[in-house]
Amino acid sequence: MTDALLQLEGVGKDYAKIESRGGRIALVWDLLCGRGASHAFTALDGVSLTMQPGQSLGVIGENGAGKSTLLKVVAGVIKPTRGRVAVRGRVGALLELGSGFHPEYTGAQNIDLAAALLGISAAELAEKRDAIVRFADLGEHLDDPIKHYSSGMVVRLGFAVATALQPDVLITDEVLAVGDESFQKKCMAWMERYLSEGGTLLLCSHSMYHVQKLCRHALWLHQGRVERYGPAIEVTQAYLAWHEEKSGNAAPRPELRTGEGPDVHRVKSLTLEPGEFIAMGRPLTVRGEAYSPDGRAPVVLVGIVRADGTPVYGVATDMDGVVPAKGSGDRYGFTLSLPSLALLPGKYAVRAHALDPEGVYLFDHVEVPLTVTGESRELGLVRLEHEWRDVVRK
Amino acid sequence: MRSGYTSAMTVPGVPVEAGGRAYGPRALDLFAQFFRREATTRYLGSVTGLAWAIVHPIALLAVYHFVFTTIFRATGFAGASFLAFVAVALWPWLAAQEAIQRAAVSIPGYGGLIRKVAFPHEIVVYASVAATLALHFAGYVVVLAALRATGEPVHLIGLVLAIPLWAVMALAVTGIALVLAALQVFVRDVEHVLMPLLMILMYLTPILYPLSLVPGSLKPWVAANPFTWLVDRLRAALLDGRLAPEPGDLVALAVAVALFVAGRWMFRRLSPYFEDFV
């Protein structure tokens, strides 16, 4: 055994698909025989994951990507169809709104029920009841049935109960989105303290802000499989970039199109230095070669677009009064140097176009991907030079 | 931080053991919670709930008494009056019937919990059966005491045997309830089939008539009904004051244990898939 608090090996979960009433009976028979469902939808597949004590992992992905299923598997609510799950320690799970509360019970009675479900003894509960009541901050509503509570109140109570038992692993599923401003702050503060004290967190959220703020690592699920796993900043940026691409040009990205025929201006090569990945603020050099059919130097346009095709900046040789230098044969070389790349972290592409010497006809278009790395909470595409005035340093 | 606890909950095909998780729910605490929930929300939730639980069997008894003694003028009830003869058997039957019917539909009521919290689902069925049987047993004792007070030849000492007899019944009822509750989650027809089936079974069990009135050719079939054994033993204990155990008791116990074990096996096979269907 390792010291891992949580270990998943090739975990998969299938949900039965039922087409008819007879299908239900057939399903029961399949399950009794120890077989899986014969018609199944795979919600989760081949997920392996290890969490050491003190780790914080954010699970991100589209709706239906399997995030909740994964969390439920870890919480023990569902049994995986394939693979192995080992949990060492106490799991506190806050899955959706009002996890495991009974609407007819009062807040106080639900604390008792939750304690029994979580395995807290009566003596331990007696010790912690005050802290729970204080954190939930329900006032006289504590003795009202939960069904009369607002959703924010239910979440407060849920969070208070789940956190009071000092879980070894805390699992939360998008609960921070509910509750008012002050309670969200209280939750964030609690989680930050919990993490700094060595707590382990498994968080599922659509808020990249929460994931980046609370989690050191992130897991991107796509259609039930792990798309990417790594440092939270990297994974969330890749995820956001993927979203931009998806909502942007749905058409396939133009590849290195080599125009046919000898009378077309073309970009023959395009390379980036230091490479596809570049840290924000570092120098970037774009190097390339263009072909001209008539012995006259072409105009070259180099531009940067965001992954979804939004133009960020473009500049052509004729705008700056330069021409590509003639190399061997019909080739004309060009190098564009950007001394400090002001692009914010994310996915981009560098495009180069070859035009006729008059700069009128756009003949060709070559694109290479560019990923800007780094940590930044700034918004937009580029970092503009700026300076705060009449402010005080924190 | 705590450490050193392992839970192996996921070898495919192997049921999750209630005590398998080091930090799982505490089965007894949970049972107590669910038992209280079943007992209170069911009977105390409505104004007349608790009264109805006692009034319903008494009303039934009164109707049967009217039909069988006033209209049919039936006789031959082992020396006791028809009232005492039927009461001794009617309460356990109604208790078993209600326990099965309620437990069969108990799982969906806990859907909110099942979807969000890990706990052994069978505790729901145990609590549902226990709450119903406990309530009706209390009613049973009250009615027997009332009959005794009105001069019926009821041997209250027979309750000493009635308790283990009810326990055997509870075991069997729990086994049946586990099967039906698990099936109901997947196939909603269970509850609709159950009602007429239990009604038919009641008339095939010697509750309203003694086994001696059953024609000879049919007698072995009626006698093979495990509930016939229970009714027979309860009448022997409470109406005749015969408390000695019989060899048949062991057979009945074996049947009850077998029903329980089989029901639990089936329930545990199906319960990991409840989350998707409740």
Image (tube, coloured by chain):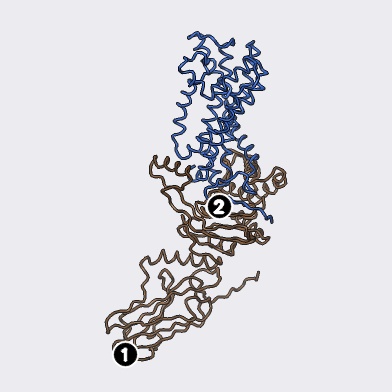
Q: Is residue B275 visible?
A: yes
The residue to which callout 2 is attached is A178
Q: Is residue B58 above or below residue A124?
A: above
Chain displayed in blue: B
Q: Secondary structure at mark 1?
A: loop
Asked which quadrant contains residue A169, the reply is: bottom right
Position of residue A250 measured from the top left corner of the image (x, y, whole percent): 37, 65
Graded by Cα atoms within 10 Å as few (under 14), some (14 to 19) or many (20 or more), the crowding at tag 2 reads: some
Q: Is residue B78 left or right of residue A327?
A: right
Q: Is residue A148 visible?
A: no
Q: Amino acid at mark 2?
A: Val
Rendering colour (chain A)? brown
Q: Nearer the viewer, residue A208 or A100?
A: A100
Q: Are marks 2 and 1 on the same chain?
A: yes
Chain of the residue under the numbered disc 1 shown in the image? A
Chain of the residue under the numbered disc 2 shown in the image? A
Q: Amino acid at mark 1?
A: Arg
Tell which tag, 2 or 1, sits nearer the viewer: 1
Q: Is residue A371 above or below residue A27?
A: below
Q: Is residue B222 left or right of residue B152?
A: left
Q: Is residue A342 above or below residue B229?
A: below
Say whether marks 2 and 1 touch (CB < 8 Å): no
Question: Residue, x 59% and y 62% (percent of image)?
Answer: A215
Q: Secondary structure at mark 2?
A: loop
Q: The N terminus of chain A appears in which quarter of the rendering?
A: bottom right
The residue to which callout 1 is attached is A296
The residues tagged by marks 2 and 1 sit, at their Cα atoms, a distance apart of: 65 Å
Question: Residue, x 53% and y 38% (percent of image)?
Answer: B107
Q: The C terminus of chain A appears in which quarter of the rendering?
A: bottom right
Q: Nearer the viewer, residue A389 or A46?
A: A46
